[in-house]
Image (cartoon, rainbow, N blue to C red):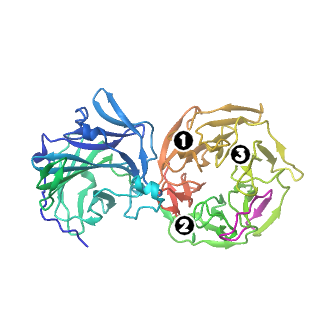
Amino acid sequence: MRLPILAVAVVSFAQTAGAHFPWLIVDGEHRPRLFFGEGLTDQDYHLPDTIAKAEVWHAGIDAPNRLIPVKPHEEEGFVGLRAESGIELRGCVQTEMTYGIYHGAKLCYYAQGIASNNPTSWPKAVAAPVVDSVSEADGATSQPALRALLRVEGGQLIATLLREGEPASGVGLTLSNNQNKETVQAETNDAGEAAFPIDTLTTGLNGLMAMIVDKADSGEIDGKPYKSAMHVLTVTLNGKPAPPEGAMLAPLPEAIASFGAAAVDGYLYVYSGHIGTAHAHSKDNLSKHFRRLKINAALDGSAEWEELPIAQPLQGLAMVPHGGKLYRVGGLDARNASGDEEQLHSVDAFASFDPATKTWTALPSLPAGRSSHNATVIGDTLYVVGGWRLSGDSNGEWQAGALSFDLSDPTAEWRVLPEPPFRRRALAAGHAGGKLVVMSGMTDDAEISKAVFFYDSATRVWSEGPEFPGNAFYGFGLAAWNVGGVLYAGGMEGVVYRLSETEDAWVAAGELATPRFFHQFAPDGRGGLLAIAGASPEEGHVSSVERVVLKP
């Protein structure tokens, strides 16, 4: 259904010169900012009282809209509102306000700021989440009366203009920028869509503006009459939309997170994991599958997943390759049926899988059950770090100690390493320069950490490494792997980082087409990485497997 509009103003940028509008942007520190200017370069105009009272919400994510605290902020070249802290780069920030009466018309402003230039993280046309009445009253489920949804298709940026949730046709949109590039005009069709070639966007700040005049709207504000209403929308986007890199492999038959995965002799192996809805734990929500995919054939589009014998359905396990075999360490066994009281048990199982015979062999058990941990192999030594032990309910006993196991010794037993200076779960592990590297994760105080630690087996000493980039939340459920002797890690931010040669910094080295967490990385055999399944902040559990092209 198309919402009828009694009168529409198709406004050009030139026609609005001299007028000021609210603009929402997300700055380099991921902080939302609001300013009131003629355009994107006019950011130091004073804030009228009505604009200064704006409420800014984080929306278009897989959760109720979240109110973002903002405060007045002034610096050279900027006067406006700024958030106290950064946000996750997904969805958008938005606000709406009634400015008052202007030349006999009610003036209503709407502003959106797209949080990321990765189209997979943009808001979708989905219903707002259902929340309790208190949150609903606070605006957690509401959508602005005028808004735009953006997508990339066929080399074009397509903006769908919605008024009261319905397509608004015949409305002019103006695309501007802060790089002195010429503005571009387009008009919405019957579906409310206006298209702009990607090449018309700049690598700087881009903005869309639309105005609708409704001559049928009349009433009073503070005792003063108005005979029409003007609705003005601004939308900003930082940079050109990021194109997905690499190739998509055959997706898994089911969407999973918190699983085991590794590559051995040209095959990608995926073991069990969590299926269904996030935080819903039961034996029904554990995948009953162990599968493999021939990587080269999959990259060429000619491979399918092969079923293998599974030992025990688990989630929160670790899986690593060594010597042509796979090694599975620990994990979480959910023993309750769906809907029943949770019975969650961390297991102490340790086993190897031989692809040649397709058989599992039990190995010496862990000293205690462990899940939500991670593992890596350096030389012939398997290292296990982090995690906790669940013994029925969700109150876990944190496993502070790190362990090692000599995979080359048939008589080997587990060894306890010197006590790490942290307690973490949902962390990542890898290695660099012969040292164990432990990254991010959740602390025993339920906080997300950006801290990185090294362990040197020669000196048996732990030391601090360079903090992981971005918001701390991006480090939850991080994945890491080594390619060509270089350590790479990435997650829900959508950026893949590498540890520098000097081991004192993280450098952006690639992008994920689908930002994800509780996923896994594995080498693709061609100098890149495979990002496997996991949970997308936007979509929930995913089944996709994508190749990430790594930059030098």
Q: Is residue 513 visible?
A: no
The answer to whether the residue labelled 2 contacts the one labelled 1, judged by CB atoms less than 8 Å apart, is no
Q: Which residue is pictured at 25% across the width and 41% down the height?
A: 50
- Where's residue 1, x and y in %? 26, 73
Q: Mark 1 or mark 3, which has the lower sequence index? A: 3
Amino acid on which the number 1 mark rests in the picture: Ala
Q: Point out the frontmost of discs 2 and 1.
A: 1
Range of magenta residues? 336-356
Q: Is residue 83 above or below residue 190?
A: above
Q: Mark 2 or mark 1, which has the lower sequence index? A: 2
Compute the Cα span from label 2 to label 1. 34 Å
Q: Residues within 10 Å of mark 2 (few under 14, many from 20)?
A: some
Q: What secondary structure is found at the residue carrying circle 2?
A: helix
Q: Which residue is mark 2?
A: 298
**Numbered circle sitting on residue 386:** 3
Q: Which residue is mark 1?
A: 472
Q: What secondary structure is found at the residue carrying circle 3?
A: loop
Q: Tell whether 86 sits left or right of 186.
A: right
Q: What secondary structure is found at the residue carrying circle 1?
A: helix
**Numbered circle sitting on residue 404:** none
- Where's residue 306, x and y in %? 64, 72
- Where's residue 258, x and y in %? 63, 58
- Where's residue 122, x and y in %? 39, 55
The quarter of the displayed image where residue 500 is located: top right
Q: Point out the frontmost of discs 3 and 2.
A: 3
| Residue with the most extreme front position | 223
Q: Which residue is pictured at 48% across the width and 50% down the height?
A: 494
Q: Is residue 255 visible?
A: yes
